[in-house]
Image: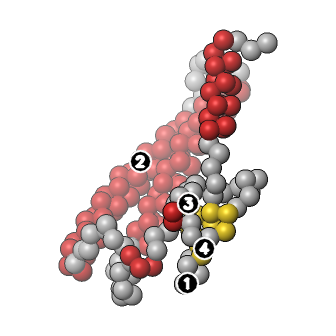
Amino acid sequence: MLQGSSRVAVLVALLTAASAHADVYKCIDEDGHVTYTNDKSRARGCKQLSSDVPVSSVPGPASTTSRPAAGPSSSAGFPNVSNDQQKTRDGERRRILEAELAAEQKSLDEARKALVEGEAVRLGDERNYQKYLDRIQALKDNVALHERNVDALRKEIGKLQQ
């Protein structure tokens, strides 16, 4: 048996579904563009769809009449940047990536040094050999992480335009 709030939810869903029924018309203009409407006054010369055909209520792309004339493909809403300003931004990005690479390379060197030192020493609480292996694995994982970071930064710097 349904609980009180579940009953209300089911009832609301049923009432909403029942009231959502409307006649839908498919209209094709002289350019072949398809539109759908439920407004009978706009549906002159349109074909009424049967009620069992699913129709998407998501609006389609804007009509071609509202688009600007063909030209350079710059997206509306995106700011245009001059070549000099873009070069300045690219230079700043390169500087930041190179600084990150230097810091990551330093961290990698420190992690490798810690691994070498860690492998050479067995701590007093590591009578169980597995504890030693777990500690060394953590050091190896740290080295691998820094190696991946260095590789990723080098790849990103390589993608920058000269």
Of residue 67 and residue 129, the one placed in the foreground of this image is 67
N-term-proximal mark, 3 vs 4: 3
Q: Please indicate, yes or no, whether residue 50 appears anywhere in the rendered image.
A: yes
The amino acid on which the numbered mark 4 sits, given as a three-letter code, is Gly
Of residue 31 and residue 97, the one placed in the foreground of this image is 31
From the top left corner, tell me how far across and down residue 162 is, in percent.
Answer: 34, 80
- Residue at 55 percent across and 79 percent down: it is 29
Rounded to the nearest angstrom, the CA distance separating label 1 from label 4 is 12 Å
Q: Please indicate, yes or no, whether residue 132 appears anywhere in the rendered image.
A: no
Residue on which the image places disc 3: 40
N-term-proximal mark, 3 vs 2: 3
Q: Are marks 1 and 4 in contact (CB under 8 Å)?
A: no
Residue on which the image places disc 4: 45
Rounded to the nearest angstrom, the CA distance separating label 4 from label 2 is 72 Å
Q: Are marks 3 and 2 in contact (CB under 8 Å)?
A: no
- Residue at 62 percent across and 35 percent down: it is 16
The amino acid on which the numbered mark 1 sits, given as a three-letter code, is Glu
Label 3 residue SS: helix
- Residue at 62 percent across and 70 percent down: it is 46
The amino acid on which the numbered mark 2 sits, given as a three-letter code, is Ser
Residue on which the image places disc 1: 30
